[in-house]
Image (tube, rainbow, N blue to C red):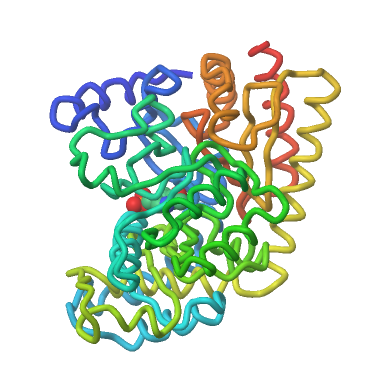
């Protein structure tokens, strides 16, 4: 395999773009080597600039639950795009999309469309502060909610990868208003509410943290989060930018039967376009301008092309059979992978839920950020490059989720298993 063209493109890009990339983890700093410059994607595959083909388990970090460039979507967009790409005025399709989202997520009576997960979270946090009249925000150690100032405190994703969970450039006065607790720790949750509960506007968490690698909520933890926020009059925000439409059509809140006050969505609902949303009860959402005092806006919010892609995506994932089939296929793949790990006694931990997974290079259980950080990132880097050489593209960092999509066939997953086994043999 040659990476010459990617190397050349990377050298050129670094002259004009910091680290040559528009989002830090893409630079491969977590695993070393040259980031692959991508030429095209189709179904389960990616091709780099040198013409190498990969089975894609990164899926653009989550959105591509139907694989790359699905024919139905491309055909629909070809027809729609000729009517214009942005109007800055409302369209029927936006209301249709909001209706579809409220059908999938009963906690969402009303929502606003925005252009990125970061923007959805930023808006939800401002709304929570405005609605409650409180200033403090509670988050999880290693939880990632986009690059929102208030939430780049003990943050996962790139923060975990580069060991910079607290970003420079955030005023101390603002950082002081963000409280953090370890995930799955009920005592810490009770203690922080006992001490600060009356000043906490919202507790925001990924119901399944996926930006420190995939970590499962302990039984009853999400229910506890629901009960305690209610008791103290704080809002519960589920950041479902990854889990929304991934674990089930109605996200983690449907999967675990817990109803948050506000939900943020992104990734899958954009159908591969920059579209995200935040929503909740009518009472809270009507606090937004121009009805209420909390300002929020966007030039490209509800962009017609992105909305068209979103409606197509929701129509595909809506039938119950979709997630039943996807999760069954993925869980069979994970079971076989666990079988390989057990047979060879590899010192790794496979965390999975639905069609999401992370292979942690540590023998001990991973239940929170502290246990995730025990993973051997050098071993992961070795494994990552061994996968790449065999044509498997996984997330270029230990602290990220990987995804099985509807485009991965059972046969392709079995072929991939043999390659993963080889990569594990090479790693250890
Ligand atoms: C990706 C992600 C975000 C940020 O979304 P962007 O579209 O990258 O701004 C927020 N929250 C979670 C849980 C995410 O995984």
In the image, residue 158 above or below residue 281: above
Quarter assignment of residue 224: bottom right
In the image, residue 228 above or below residue 187: below
Percent x, y of residue 245: 56, 64
Task: Count every numbered label the image shows and give the total.
Answer: 0
Residue positioned 74% across, 47% down in the render: 410
Q: Is residue 168 rendered to the left or right of residue 316?
A: left
- Extreme residue in the right direction: 343
Q: Is residue 41 rendered to the left or right of residue 118?
A: right
- Extreme residue in the front direction: 195
Residue positioned 50% across, 59% down in the render: 240
Q: Is residue 289 rendered to the left or right of residue 315?
A: left
Percent x, y of residue 88: 17, 78
In the image, residue 227 above or below residue 32: below
Residue positioned 65% across, 21% down in the render: 362
- Extreme residue in the left direction: 16
Residue positioned 68% across, 34% down in the render: 416
Viewer-side residue, 293 vs 265: 293
Percent x, y of residue 377: 52, 19
Quadrant of the image containing the C terminus:
top right
In the image, residue 244 above or below residue 56: below
Percent x, y of residue 200: 39, 59
């Amino acid at each position: 395999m040659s990476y010459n063209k990617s190397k050349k493109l990377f050298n050129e890009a670094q002259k004009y773009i910091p680290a040559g990339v528009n989002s830090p983890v893409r630079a491969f700093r977590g695993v070393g080597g040259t980031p692959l410059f991508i030429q095209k994607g189709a179904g389960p595959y990616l091709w780099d600039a040198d013409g190498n083909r990969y089975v894609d388990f990164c899926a653009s970090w989550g959105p591509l639950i139907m694989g790359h460039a699905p024919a139905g979507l491309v055909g629909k967009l070809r027809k729609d795009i000729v009517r214009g790409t942005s109007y800055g005025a409302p369209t029927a399709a936006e209301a249709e999309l909001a209706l579809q989202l409220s059908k999938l997520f009963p906690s969402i009576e009303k929502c606003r469309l925005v252009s990125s997960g970061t923007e959805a979270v930023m808006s939800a946090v401002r709304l929570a502060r405005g609605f409650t009249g409180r200033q403090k925000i509670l988050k999880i150690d290693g939880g990632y909610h986009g690059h929102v100032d208030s939430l780049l405190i003990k943050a996962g994703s790139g923060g975990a990868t580069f060991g910079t969970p607290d970003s420079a450039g955030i005023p101390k006065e603002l950082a002081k208003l963000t409280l953090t607790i370890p995930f799955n720790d009920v005592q810490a949750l009770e203690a922080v509410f006992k001490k600060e509960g009356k000043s906490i506007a919202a507790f925001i968490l990924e119901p399944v943290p996926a930006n420190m690698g995939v970590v499962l909520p302990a039984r009853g933890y999400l229910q506890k989060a629901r009960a305690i926020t209610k008791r103290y009059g704080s809002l519960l925000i589920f950041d479902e930018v990854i889990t929304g439409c991934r674990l089930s059509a109605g996200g983690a809140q449907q999967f675990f039967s817990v109803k948050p006050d506000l939900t943020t969505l992104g990734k899958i609902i954009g159908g591969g376009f920059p579209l995200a949303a935040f929503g909740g009860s009518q009472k809270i959402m009507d606090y937004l301008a121009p009805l209420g005092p909390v300002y929020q806006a966007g030039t490209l919010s509800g962009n017609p092309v992105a909305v068209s892609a979103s409606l197509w995506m929701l129509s595909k994932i809506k039938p119950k059979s979709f997630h039943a089939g996807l999760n069954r296929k993925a869980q069979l793949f994970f079971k076989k992978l666990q079988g390989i790990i057990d047979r060879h006694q590899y010192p790794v931990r496979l965390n999975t839920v639905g069609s999401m997974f992370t292979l942690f290079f540590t023998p001990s259980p991973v239940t929170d950020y502290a246990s995730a950080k025990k993973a051997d990132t050098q071993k992961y880097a070795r494994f990552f490059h061994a996968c790449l050489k065999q044509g498997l593209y996984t997330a270029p960092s230990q602290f990220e989720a990987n995804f099985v999509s509807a485009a991965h066939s059972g046969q392709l997953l079995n072929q991939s298993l043999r390659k993963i086994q080889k990569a594990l043999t090479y790693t250890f």
